[in-house]
Amino acid sequence: MTLTASEAGQAAAHFRFFTMEVLRTRRLGHSFLRVTFGGESLADFRSGGYDQSLSLFLPPPHAEHTELPSTDEDTWFGAWRGMPDAERPVMRSYTVREQRRTDAGATEVDIDFVLHGDTSPASRWAGRAVSGRRIMAIGPAVAQNKSVRFQPPAATDTYLMYADETALPAACAILDRLPAGTRVKAWFEVPHPDDRLAPHTLADADITWIVREKGASRPERTARVVDAVRAAEPPAAKTPYAWLAGEAGTVRAVRRHLVGERSVDRRTVRFTGYWRLGASEEQLLAEAYAGRAPSEDPASEL
Ligand SMILES: Cc1cc2nc3c(=O)[nH]c(=O)nc-3n(C[C@H](O)[C@H](O)[C@H](O)COP(=O)(O)OP(=O)(O)OC[C@H]3O[C@@H](n4cnc5c(N)ncnc54)[C@H](O)[C@@H]3O)c2cc1C
């Protein structure tokens, strides 16, 4: 898909650069760290809620703060790509778990990071985050933007959700917003029992937690999720909407099951690979850019 000039202009107007300063951190469960950001530029931040995502630029290990040579919408990408490898901030996709305004009128943004090891740049950065550290982000300047992927048709009567730990912040933010009584069947897969973070929701949500076996192979983890979905009584739904996000292979398998075995209309399944076992986000971006126009959203619908 190549965007027309007016679409590209519109997309650019929806997003802009923000400087985000770490205010505090809080450990949630076994694998999650909530980082709360503030900063003056966040006054113009407009999360659309639900699964709103943004792109973070995290500094290299030797630097305290993120420095980008340009934040101009026409030149930043080339300037960023042109930086020496050792100096270039890594770009990673994350979810706005919550945006709020404090009593003092300041804007705060929470992001829940999965700590999955010390060798991956984003996980490593989050594990060492201390107040005062500044990073950069491309985030929403208007609430209606294309990085809110949860877009159910108005007639939806039941929601089917699958999320692994990386997509649990998004799933919880979606559940936060669903009205009282909304019918939801959800499967949430986490690495540790303490990661079963109970979402606050008014929805009538039936959640099946799947705690992954330590050391399970890729096929084993996917099979366990698909088996759990298959074993569930299908909710009596006329117009279901499915939202699936997490490790790309598992997401694809759950989608295949819903469309192939449960006859869910493929047009009502929103599925996004949030990461892929064995591939860094750079590798996924490189694949996405090789196959598509650079203007297309690389946080792929795989
Ligand atoms: C739209 C969107 C929203 C997202 N929201 C969130 C969010 O709110 N919170 C969150 O934690 N993540 C979120 N993610 C996923 C996150 O971007 C990836 O996990 C990312 O790869 C982390 O970057 P990294 O530098 O830690 O690891 P990378 O350098 O990208 O990867 C290094 C290695 O670690 C593996 N890896 C990556 N993530 C994990 C993981 N979670 N567990 C185990 N191995 C992993 C990769 O397969 C690779 O082998 C989101 C992704 C997308 C596309």
Image (cartoon, rainbow, N blue to C red):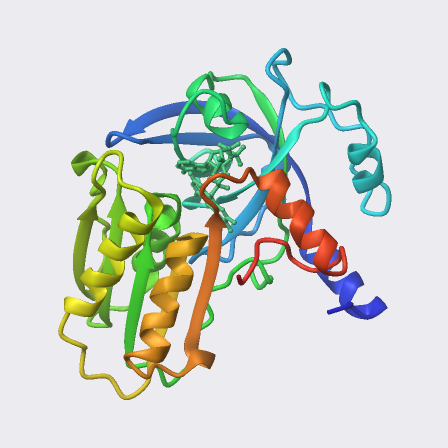
Which quadrant would residue 165 be assigned to in this image? top left
Assign the N terminus to one quadrant of the image.
bottom right
Looking at the image, residue 126 sits to the left or right of residue 78; the answer is left
**Residue at figure coordinates x 70%, y 60% from the top left:** 296
Callout count? 0
Q: Nearer the viewer, residue 50 or 272?
A: 272
| Up-down relation of residue 44 to residue 251 (above or below) | above
Would residue 129 be visible to someone looking at this image? yes
**Is 281 situated left or right of 254 in this image?**
right
Residue nearest the viewer, comparing 124 with 250: 250
Residue 148, horizontal then vertical, whole percent: 52, 60
> Residue 193's spot in the image, x, y percent?
16, 37
Q: Residue furthest bottom?
A: 238
| Residue 203 seen in render | no
Residue 191: percent from the left, percent from the top? 26, 38
Q: Is residue 117 above or below residue 192?
A: above
Q: Quadrant of residue 281?
A: top right
Percent position (x, y) of residue 185?
22, 67
Q: Nearer the viewer, residue 211 or 71?
A: 211
Residue at the (26%, 56%) spot, across then down: 223
In the displayed structure image, the side of residue 85 where residue 94 appears, left or right:
left
Residue at the top extreme, as displayed: 62
Q: Please tell me whether residue 288 is drawn above or below residue 108 in the rendered image.
A: below
Q: 60 above or below 96?
A: above
Name the residue: 39% across, 59% down. 251
Identified at 84% across, 39% down, the residue is 78
User: Relative to 183, is 256 on the left or the right?
Assistant: right
Choose top left, top right, bottom left or bottom right for residue 254: bottom left
Depth check: give the residue in front, 247 or 97. Answer: 247
